[in-house]
Image (cartoon, coloured by chain):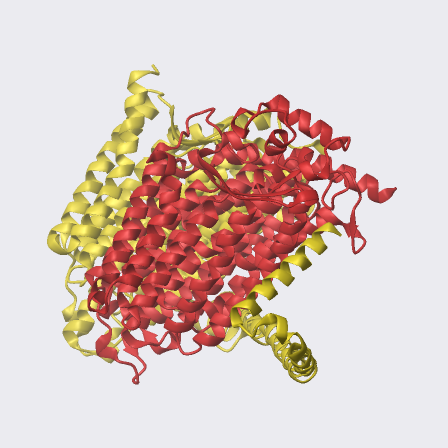
Chain colours: A yellow, B red
């Protein structure tokens, strides 16, 4: 079973990883020449690697062929820095998720980015991103995960700031990179702890050493270092997966092109944090697990709350992404790693679908803006409405994926979110007390989720086209989208259906995916049923409530009087708990203040002292010079005068010749030297 | 020729300098080509050297054993019989091991870039190119010398061309900057000189002494038995003072057996110096001397001034190579000769490393001048060298040397980045520019490569270096107990701040829509010329290659470093024990 065939798979997987890199290099150097062909070329490359990924997936899942191949990067003493290419079931499905979504985003972008002056560069960056993301998935060495981790960060930086003539985009790209860097500093500390503990960075070796209790440090510092490793690695995930308190970069990242948001900031890169946590979960101590669960819960709740009031179509989705990632992190914390991974996969598809739908809508609105020569915000949902008749394919795709996000039974999100909540509930019943806050806030966030999903659905697709209030007959300018945009929506919308993952739409546990991931985790079926009923009813009531407020507007006035725009609760949601302004005021301002202060300190104090010392030296030198001139020189002159007088006496035997002066001097000097040496 | 390869590295540029001085004025136009040719010859020679060296497993590793150096050239240079004072012996002694061979290569590479960059020099060319070649020779000599006197000679002599190169061809405040540079470094050299004289009075050359007392015919015939015999005799004071052959050989100074009992640096004696142990004080003096060169905070303030005022080519050489003499010197001299100081002061060295990393990064964040920003980023990056050295782990010191090489390449690029703008507009205030990318796309792409390489992005050499330093610094506490874990953790702040000042600069100066302060010569802002591109591209390729294939350098560095770490740690701990016992008595 192993052997030749599995090695083939490693080679194919490496090929899949390298192809987007090839696309990147090709387009970065020859993009200008290829022009429009560059996009098609990149899309073709991705389509091919997606097909190969499906083959790998098929081989690994059906023929049970997990494989691990090692390449040596370089060796240092006894530590070889080895790249392990690890293709297990998890890696195989992630391979499919990444290449499929990336391929579809490529296809979608062909139309979306048409006419952009840096069209080839856009596809080059997408290639770089896909390569790095695949690297994270396949490598089994924490240093390499970190390397690719940084590279996805850079591709994200480049793509968020792709429209660099927009100052907001530039700011957002810088912010994304910096906030991630903070998390990455923690990640690095985690790696360093692992290295100190195990003298190795290969996850396989680390795991086997950890389970057999072999550590390179003394007993006293073991537990501390293991906890530090766990916390450090989690910091990395906090940054990349936009968890509290580093969530602030993701909403801003929406300044990038929308297909990028779909690929990087919804489906894949932001999920890398969760993926990494799942890979390294064996190292987490109970304390670290509680921290992870708490952070996940807080994030899920805060972001869901923030999504309630947003009017920008992408902002809603961005906060929703943060919130859903919070669920996944919560799942890791409470110990249901399998459920988190399941949610990662379902979320990747339905959220990519939602973002691409949003992209299609923005594209359509943009065209209206262009054709009517009017100025309005094409992303503002208050300008939309009634679009279901105009762009039906988008509507259907959006409906499916939105229902998955809301967690409605029959859709994929229901299965996976439910699995996490079941885990959270059984975690709580095990620990009791405050631990019940975790499922409680999990449920509350589920209600919020259903509500904001319903709100968005209604604002965008139902009612009348609101833009017509401002611009007459704006609706007539709406054109349907082309097939390159429709196809990705259809595929991803289809993948949001629950049947894809489990034949029993109310039970994900025995579906092919979760059944494999969950391992030996035992699930209490009465708890499961309870959680299922609660979350299904929360989803339905959330959607219902949204309909009552925004659909037939029965409760609209009540909502307005309860949460007017001037209320603190409303502002808290709109401004995402004022996290940004807090950081701006506390962190950024003070850092720059410290920097300015230190610069002044450097210039006036350190350098000041140096200059003062120099000045002192100069004054001292002047004093010495004065002493030299009037006292020493005076003395010398006096001596000269004296010797002049005595010279007259000795002149007789010197004969008055200059040469002999010199000879006498030399003779005297030598005498002196001999005298001194013999002393 | 292969016996004198190392000498060629020194004398080819020296000869070029003389030729340049002798050429008639009518040939002034060819001076830059002569200089470029010389540096290229030097590069070829240094590549030959790298190929000649044996880096296979079990190859000689150098450090404290003369026989283990490669391509050794050892000639008697000065031999003065001073009667009862014994004999002065100064040798022309060159050799390579893992600590310096990569530095020689780096020097050759950066000098080529510096030579191309010097094409911009338009006045007093004769003087400039002659001094440039002298500088090149002295730097090479400094890295290869294994005799303290010879080392010191090159070390001091380096100041002279540097002083004039900044003072004559520099920016508006060049006199101030050059004199500051000169005095600062001179101060450091005085510390080194004091210890050197002390060492000279304490250390004998056992081989030459063996010849002198008639154990054997000539130095070539000296056996290890002879040497041991001399050392035994020295211990029991059997050798007459006039028969002692004193030496400046660094290698002899590393062996405790060669110290004359009762001399100031003899380790058994508790010779005090202002109430402190003389060997520890000597370590400190040497360390400070080199730390000024590195430069370490708080003795770094010469660097921003010197950099901002120096012409681009000289900034490139200064940041690319000269700073590394500080780091290399620390390893070769105080750490090897007084290893107990390395143990005793490790906590403080680590602390100052961390301070440099964080402080340099913060000040860089606060500056508004591009060149100054880069200068302070150098301070921050050299902090990693100190941190890695302080950890005294193989990872840490490999990382420190890797960092020196990598920073040599990257900082050369960074100063070219500043030089390109300065050449065009003579203004480097970051606020005066916006969106340079639209006018200078190729240049901006190079800026991005340089910035991302410098902020430690994986795939570039800086990442490997910093990773190794971090690995070493972090494991030091559990491996050898020298520096605490928190130092590595606090240093990660440098990574965050590094990203902050570079990305902020990118955003403010390079990306977005074009704008420039209206007094500036905007029409001069053209993209890279092919001469400039020729400088950038090899550097960019090199930092990527070294980021992807670290073994290219590590295979050369690490055998010596492994030996070095064991040697310093073992001897250091042993000596420190003796010293502390003596103090406690």
Relative to the observer, which residue lies in front, B359 or B505? B359
Q: Is residue B450 above or below residue A409?
A: below
Q: Position of residue B315 (x, y in %)?
A: 40, 63
Would you identify the image quadrant in which residue A416 lies? top left
Asked whether, in this view, residue B559 is left or right of residue A254, the answer is right
What is the count of numbered marks? 0
Asked if one can make out residue B331 in the rendered structure from this viewpoint, the answer is no
Asked whether, in this view, residue A338 is left or right of residue A67, the answer is right
Would you identify the image quadrant in which residue A22 lies? top left
The residue at 62%/75% (across/down) is A651
Q: Position of residue A525 (x, y in %)?
A: 54, 32
Asked whether, in this view, residue B393 is left or right of residue A370, the answer is right
Q: Residue furthest right?
A: B585
Q: Quadrant of the N terminus of chain B?
A: top left
Would you identify the image quadrant in which residue A639 lies? bottom right
Relative to the observer, which residue lies in front, A358 or A394? A358
The residue at 35%/70% (across/down) is B509
Q: Position of residue A316 (x, y in %)?
A: 39, 61
Asked if one can make out residue B457 in the rendered structure from this viewpoint, the answer is yes
Relative to the observer, which residue lies in front, A349 or A383? A349
Q: Position of residue B192 (x, y in %)?
A: 61, 54
Q: Quadrant of the C terminus of chain B?
A: top right
């Amino acid at each position: 079973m192993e052997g030749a065939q599995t090695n083939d798979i490693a080679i194919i997987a490496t090929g899949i990883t390298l192809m987007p890199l090839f696309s990147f290099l090709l387009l970065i150097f020859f993009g200008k020449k290829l022009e429009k062909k560059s996009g098609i070329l990149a899309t073709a490359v991705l389509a091919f690697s997606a097909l190969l990924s499906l083959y790998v997936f098929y081989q690994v899942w059906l023929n049970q062929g997990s494989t691990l191949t090692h390449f040596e990067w370089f060796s240092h003493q006894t530590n070889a820095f080895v790249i392990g290419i690890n293709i297990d079931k998890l890696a195989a499905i992630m391979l499919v998720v990444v290449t499929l979504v990336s391929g579809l985003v490529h296809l979608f972008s062909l139309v979306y980015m048409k006419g952009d002056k840096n069209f080839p560069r856009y596809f080059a960056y997408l290639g770089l991103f896909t390569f790095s993301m695949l690297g994270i998935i396949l490598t089994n060495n924490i240093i390499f995960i970190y390397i690719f981790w940084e590279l996805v960060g850079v591709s994200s930086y480049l793509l968020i700031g792709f429209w660099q003539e927009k100052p907001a985009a530039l700011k957002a790209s810088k912010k994304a990179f910096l906030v991630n860097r903070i998390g990455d500093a923690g990640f690095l500390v985690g790696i360093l702890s692992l290295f100190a503990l195990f003298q190795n960075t290969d996850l396989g070796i680390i795991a086997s050493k950890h389970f057999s209790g072999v550590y390179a440090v003394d007993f006293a510092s073991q537990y501390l270092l293991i906890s530090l490793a766990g916390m450090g690695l989690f910091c990395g995930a906090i940054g990349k997966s936009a968890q509290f308190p580093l969530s602030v970069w993701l909403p801003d990242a929406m300044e990038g092109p929308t297909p990028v948001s779909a690929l990087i900031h919804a489906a894949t890169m932001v999920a890398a944090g969760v993926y990494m946590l799942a890979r390294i979960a064996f190292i987490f101590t109970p304390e670290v697990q509680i921290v992870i669960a708490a952070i996940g819960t807080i994030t899920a709740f805060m972001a869901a709350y923030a999504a309630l009031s947003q009017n920008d179509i992408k902002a809603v989705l961005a906060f929703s992404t943060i919130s859903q990632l919070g669920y996944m992190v919560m799942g890791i914390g409470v110990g249901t790693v399998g459920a988190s991974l399941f949610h990662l996969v379902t979320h990747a598809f339905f959220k990519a679908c939602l973002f691409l739908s949003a992209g299609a809508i923005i594209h359509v609105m943009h065209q209206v803006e262009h054709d009517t020569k009017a100025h309005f915000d094409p992303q503002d949902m208050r300008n939309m409405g009634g679009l279901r008749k105009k762009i039906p394919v988008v509507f259907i795709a959006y409906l499916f994926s939105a229902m998955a996000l809301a967690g409605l039974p029959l859709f994929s999100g229901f299965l996976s979110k439910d699995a996490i909540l079941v885990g959270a509930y059984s975690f709580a019943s095990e620990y009791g007390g405050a631990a019940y806050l975790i499922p409680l806030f999990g449920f509350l966030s589920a209600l919020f989720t259903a509500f904001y999903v319903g709100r968005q659905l209604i604002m965008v697709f139902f009612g009348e086209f609101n833009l017509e209030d401002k611009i007459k007959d704006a609706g007539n300018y709406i054109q349907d989208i082309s097939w390159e945009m429709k196809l990705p929506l259809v595929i991803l919308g289809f993948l949001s259906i629950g049947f894809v993952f489990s034949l029993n739409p109310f039970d994900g546990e025995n579906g092919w995916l979760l059944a494999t991931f969950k391992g030996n985790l035992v699930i209490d079926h009465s708890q499961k049923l309870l959680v299922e009923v609660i979350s299904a009813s929360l989803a339905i009531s959330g959607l219902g409530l949204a309909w009552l407020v925004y659909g037939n507007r029965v409760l609209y006035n009540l909502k307005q009087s309860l949460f007017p725009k001037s209320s603190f609760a409303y502002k808290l949601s709109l401004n995402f708990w004022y996290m940004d302004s807090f950081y701006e005021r506390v962190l950024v301002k003070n850092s720059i203040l410290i920097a300015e202060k230190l610069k002044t300190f450097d210039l006036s104090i350190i350098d000041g002292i140096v200059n003062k010392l120099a000045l002192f030296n100069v004054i001292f030198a002047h004093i010495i010079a004065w002493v030299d001139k009037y006292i020493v020189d005076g003395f010398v002159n006096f001596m000269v005068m004296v010797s002049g007088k005595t010279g007259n006496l000795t002149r007789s035997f010197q004969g008055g010749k200059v040469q002999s002066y010199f000879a006498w001097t030399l003779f005297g000097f030598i005498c002196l030297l001999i005298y001194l040496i013999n002393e | 020729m292969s016996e004198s390869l190392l000498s060629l590295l020194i004398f080819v540029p020296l000869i070029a300098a003389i030729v340049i001085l002798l050429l008639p004025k009518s040939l002034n136009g060819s001076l830059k080509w002569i200089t470029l040719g010389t540096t290229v010859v030097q590069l070829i020679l240094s590549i030959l050297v790298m190929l000649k060296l044996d880096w296979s497993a079990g190859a000689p590793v150098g450090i404290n054993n003369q026989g283990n150096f490669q391509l050794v050239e050892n000639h008697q240079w000065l031999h003065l019989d001073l009667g009862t004072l014994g004999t002065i012996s100064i040798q022309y002694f060159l050799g390579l091991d893992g600590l310096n061979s990569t530095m020689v290569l780096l020097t050759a590479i950066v000098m080529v870039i510096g030579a191309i960059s010097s094409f911009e020099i338009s006045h007093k060319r004769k003087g400039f190119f002659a001094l440039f070649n002298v500088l090149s020779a002295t730097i090479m000599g400094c890295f290869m010398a294994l005799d303290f006197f010879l080392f010191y000679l090159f070390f001091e002599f380096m100041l002279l061309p540097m002083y004039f190169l900044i003072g004559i061809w520099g920016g508006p405040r060049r006199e101030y900057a050059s004199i500051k540079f000169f005095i600062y470094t001179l101060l450091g050299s005085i510390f080194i000189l004091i210890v050197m004289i002390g060492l000279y009075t304490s250390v004998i050359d056992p081989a030459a002494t063996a010849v002198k007392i008639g154990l054997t015919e000539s130095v070539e015939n000296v056996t290890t038995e002879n040497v041991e015999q001399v050392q035994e005799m020295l211990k029991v004071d059997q050798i007459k003072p006039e028969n002692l052959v004193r030496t400046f050989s660094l290698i002899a100074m590393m062996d405790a057996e060669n110290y004359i009992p009762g001399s100031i640096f003899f380790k058994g004696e508790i010779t005090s110096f202002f109430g402190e142990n003389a060997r520890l004080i000597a370590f400190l003096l040497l360390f400070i001397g080199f730390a000024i060169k590195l430069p370490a905070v708080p003795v770094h303030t010469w660097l921003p001034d010197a950099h901002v005022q120096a012409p681009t080519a000289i900034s490139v050489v200064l940041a690319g190579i000269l700073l590394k003499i500080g780091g290399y010197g620390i390893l070769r001299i105080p750490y090897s000769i007084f290893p107990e100081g390395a143990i005793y002061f490790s906590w403080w060295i680590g602390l100052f490393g961390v301070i440099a990393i964080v402080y340099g990064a913060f000040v860089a964040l606060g500056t508004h001048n591009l060149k100054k920003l880069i200068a302070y980023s150098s301070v921050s990056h050299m902090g990693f060298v100190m941190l890695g050295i302080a950890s005294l782990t193989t990872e840490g010191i490999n990382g420190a040397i890797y960092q020196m090489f990598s920073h040599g390449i990257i900082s050369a690029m960074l100063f070219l980045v500043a030089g390109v703008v300065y050449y065009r507009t003579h203004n480097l205030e970051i606020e005066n520019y916006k969106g340079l990318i639209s006018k200078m796309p190729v240049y901006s792409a190079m800026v991005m490569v340089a910035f991302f390489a410098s902020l430690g992005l994986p795939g570039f050499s800086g990442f490997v270096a910093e990773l190794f330093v971090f690995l070493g610094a972090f494991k030091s506490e559990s491996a050898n107990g020298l520096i605490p874990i928190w130092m590595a953790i606090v240093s990660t702040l440098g990574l965050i701040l590094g990203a902050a000042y570079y990305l902020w600069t990118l955003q403010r100066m390079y990306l977005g829509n074009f704008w420039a302060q209206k007094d500036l010569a905007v029409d001069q802002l053209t993209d890279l010329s092919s001469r400039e591109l020729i400088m950038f591209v090899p550097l960019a390729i090199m930092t990527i290659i070294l980021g992807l294939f670290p073994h290219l350098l590590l295979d050369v560095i690490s055998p010596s470093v492994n030996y070095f770490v064991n040697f310093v740690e073992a001897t250091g701990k042993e000596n420190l024990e003796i010293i502390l016992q003596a103090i406690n008595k």
